[in-house]
Amino acid sequence: MITREIQLTAQVTGSPTLDHFTVAKTEVDGEVLVRTEQIGLAATYLELMRADCAIPVPAWRPGQRVGVATIGTVVRSDNPDLKVGDLVQSMTGWSEHSAGPAGSYVKLDRTLFADPGYHLGQGPTAYHGMAEVAAVGAGDVVFVSGAAGGVGSLAGQIARCLGATRVIGSAGSPAKVDYLVRELGYDAAFDYHDGSTADRLRELAPEGISVFFDVVGGEQYQGALQAARPGARFALCGSLSSQLGGAAQRFPQPDPAAAEARGVALLPFSCHHTPAQIAAWREHFSTWLGEGRFVYPQTVVEGGIEDVPRAFLALLRGTYRGNVSVRLSTPVS
């Protein structure tokens, strides 16, 4: 069948604009046909749009469908394992429909979460980085950069559930700072525009931080390094400050020698997860939700496939809070 999808028109060299995307008609065919209903967005997609992509996977090319995680409903199937009406998740990208072998789709339990969009959250990244990479536990003082975003809004809560003594977050506005403390249970938070990160951390964590979960890099990484205790673990998830803007505005990557001199362990990790990592997150997530210990922060944007790039650019500007997805309000059958 013919469907519509979002393709990249040119690889990004500076800041992305709507001109980097186009709506194209394409034919999809396969063992299973799925109508896309909700599309997940993440800031890390920007790196995949660059020719000098620093993630160890192939960058997206002009003329290629972009995006990754989606949820949809099976509308045709030639495989007994997937039936018409089944809810499935896939990595098929920004399109109104997708098709392929049954093995490329994961059947979801519609009753597991209150909203199917919960499956699109960046929980596997936050959980893997906080629980397995940084190994957060009792007594830890944790700092999370970009704490109001899709990963950070989950990472801080995970640290609390794992027994951290104190959890501190940074965000880009007073409203987001208030949101972190009042709604997400952070012990303290600050607007990174208000003075240096090092000074704010010395004030909020006078004995130093033992864990830093970083999605921003740049000045916030440098400030965390100055405020770190000997033996601190830095789980390096991303570096938004090095992704946005042109080369002149991008911060340098962390210096391992400086971290080693302060006794800090740098622990970069991949955001591409194994089935076991995803299952571990879903098990803990559903348990914590059921116990009332966890809030799932999300922003759902209603629109058509043509609105997905606009929502993605708004995410990069920090317009939204929590995990962001687009629900296709007028999907084509």
Image (tube, helix red, strand yellow):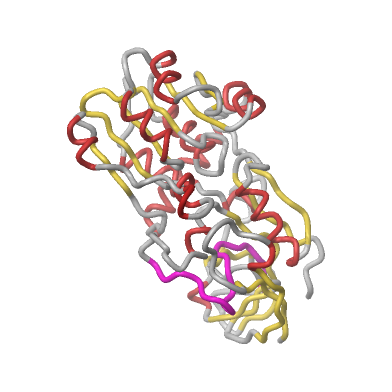
Count of all numbered marks drawn on residues in the image? 0
- From the top left corner, tell me how far across and down residue 322 is, in percent: 60, 41
Write down the region rendered in magenta.
57-74
- From the top left corner, tell me how far across and down residue 179 is, in percent: 63, 27
Q: Quadrant of residue 79?
A: bottom right
Judge whether 31 appears above or below 49 on screen.
below
**Residue 220 versus residue 1: which sits nearer the camera?**
220
Judge whether 1 appears above or below 109 on screen.
below
**Residue 61 versus residue 299: which sits nearer the camera?**
61
Magenta span: chief secondary structure:
loop
- From the top left corner, tell me how far across and down residue 251 is, in percent: 41, 45
Judge whether 325 appears above or below 182 on screen.
below
Judge whether 228 appears above or below 279 on screen.
above
User: Which quarter shows the C terminus?
Assistant: bottom right
Decide whether residue 69 is among the magenta residues.
yes
Examine the rendering and report whether any part of residue 282 can be seen. Answer: no
Q: Residue at x 27, y 42 (%)?
A: 255
**Residue 288 versus residue 215: which sits nearer the camera?**
215
Answer with left or right where residue 97 lies relative to residue 294. right
Decide whether residue 75 is among the magenta residues.
no
Q: Residue at x 66, y 42 (%)?
A: 320
In the orientation shown, which residue stands out farthest toward the right?
Answer: 330
- From the top left corner, tell me how far across and down residue 94 is, in percent: 64, 68
User: Which quarter shows the N terminus?
Assistant: bottom right
